[in-house]
Amino acid sequence: MDTDTKASGEHELQKNAVSLRHVLSQGAIANGPLASVTVALTGAAFYGLGALPFAMLAGSVLILLYINTTYQFSKHIQSAGGIYQLVRAGFGEGMAGATGTSYGLANLLLVCANALIAPGLFDAAAEALGWNPPSWTWVAVALFVIIVPFALGWYRVRITLDYGIFTALIEVIVVVGMSAYFIIHAGGHNTFTVFNPHHARNGWSGIGVAMALSSVALGGADNVLSLGEESKAPREAIKKSLIIVQLAVVALYILVAYALTVAWGPDKMGSFATTGAPLLTLAGRAGGTWLLVIIAIFALNSIIGVNVAINITVSRLIFDAGRQGLLPKSTSRTHPRFKTPTVGLLICLAIELLATFIPERIWGLTTGFLVVVTACTAGYVLQQLITSAALMGFARRQRIREVIFYYVVPTVACLFLIYSLYGNLWPFTMPDSLGVFILLAVVVLAGIFATVRFWGASTTRDVPELIEPRS
């Protein structure tokens, strides 16, 4: 093998590595029903309070409007860069750099939020079994849910996603079963008042933040975009996975949000998010100690699954940015045998560790979690806003005349996302809002860097196989 061929092979992903079921698995574990119920849904409850089901319904509208964006884009672009390449096709290098940064950081901050809340799940299960864990165990648990997904992501993506298929199925069965039990057990306490937005913290302002956090809980389907270069028949596999995963997730979460609210009590939801592990509290009430422990184990496994999917997505985004020249060429290096983006994975690991342990040292687990998850939400919303607008820019460039799905729906999505982003920025509260402004500053700097980096470069630098020529 000559030097050029070897060098090329060190910067390539494995072609035709996964099938439709693996792409579906990526979307399912990226959502992680039990993890999202524990993390994003708990954060949404802090703002949505007794109107959590209404916030989830609003978040469903938001995510379905947004999923149209990724669905329409997936007809034309299949790339490991995912969101980065979509915005690049619509708006060019500067906005792509900013949006890729927003999306990548939002995902990695979700890993950090998972790591900050996982110790609460572990402690709840341990205490239920009569063991009072020492204070240092939170470090071990946090490291466990960060490092295990990193290690799994190092090996062939097909093996990792085979594991995800079964865990996602088990999670769905557990969540549906628990929701049904809570609704039946609530009896006469079932009520439609949970769909009244005035029950949220600060009314409609709280709904804005809760809606955004709900959309994070509902998110994950767009992670399938990162498999665009490793899947068989990628256009069809990604289109189908986006629709199947997203519709299933929306139905599941409206059910679970309603069930948890009526089970806890709509007028008592102020204590829901501050309990630490409200899902486990309800599980303990419903089935005693062993059900609580079993749910805790499944939830921790779900967190690992989410973190695996995020590492797959963000490491490939970094790989693609390196391949395109936005980041150093070394960041696009892949494992010589497994063809996984190992340098990208190491960068993900470093950011995850820093953004987990620094907030905890400053604010502690609970407040640190709120700071991180709020910043994570703002990053997701900003990325969705720019990507939805980029679809219109792409349609204009490509002279696409399908007005409804390429112009009208993205415009409506942008309006919802602007309102949701406003809810994350105002009212400004310390320290919860601090992470949002730090993230926005980094995103702006990334956009400026990308603009300067490619100033004067050709606007048609797209890798030929990424964008399908229009007839």
Image: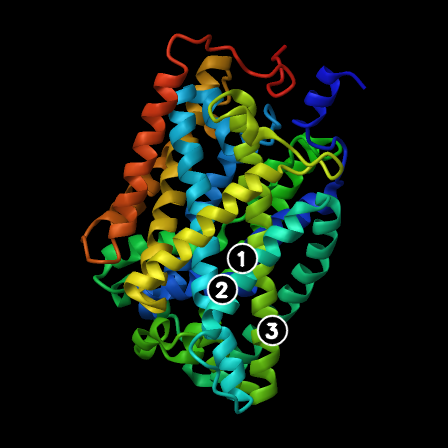
The answer for how far apart the CA atoms under marks 2 and 3 are is 14 Å
How far across and how far down the image is residue 172, in percent?
63, 64
Q: Earlier in the sequence, mark 2 or mark 3?
A: 2
* Residue depth check, mark 1 versus mark 3: number of the one nearer the observer: 1
How far across and how far down the image is residue 236, in percent?
69, 33
Q: Which mark is residue 112?
A: none
| Residue bearing the label numbered 3 | 297
163 left or right, relative to 295:
right
> Disc 3 on helix, strand or loop?
helix
Find the residue positioned furthest to the right: 1
| Residue bearing the label numbered 2 | 142
Q: Amino acid at mark 2?
A: Ala
Q: Residue at x 51, y 40 (%)?
A: 67
Quadrant in the picture for residue 368? bottom left
Crowding near pointer 2: few (<14 within 10 Å), some, many (20+)? many
Residue 357 vertical placement versus 282 (above, below): above
Q: Amino acid at mark 3?
A: Ile
Given contact means CB atoms under 8 Å apart, are the residues at marks 1 and 2 in contact? yes
> Disc 2 on helix, strand or loop?
helix
Residue 383 vertical placement versus 450 (above, below): below
The answer for how far apart the CA atoms under marks 1 and 2 are is 6 Å
Find the residue positioned furthest to the bottom: 130
Q: Which mark is residue 146?
A: 1
The answer for how far apart the CA atoms under marks 1 and 3 are is 16 Å
How far across and how far down the image is residue 7, in percent?
68, 22
Q: Earlier in the sequence, mark 1 or mark 3?
A: 1
Q: Nearer the viewer, residue 311 or 37?
A: 311
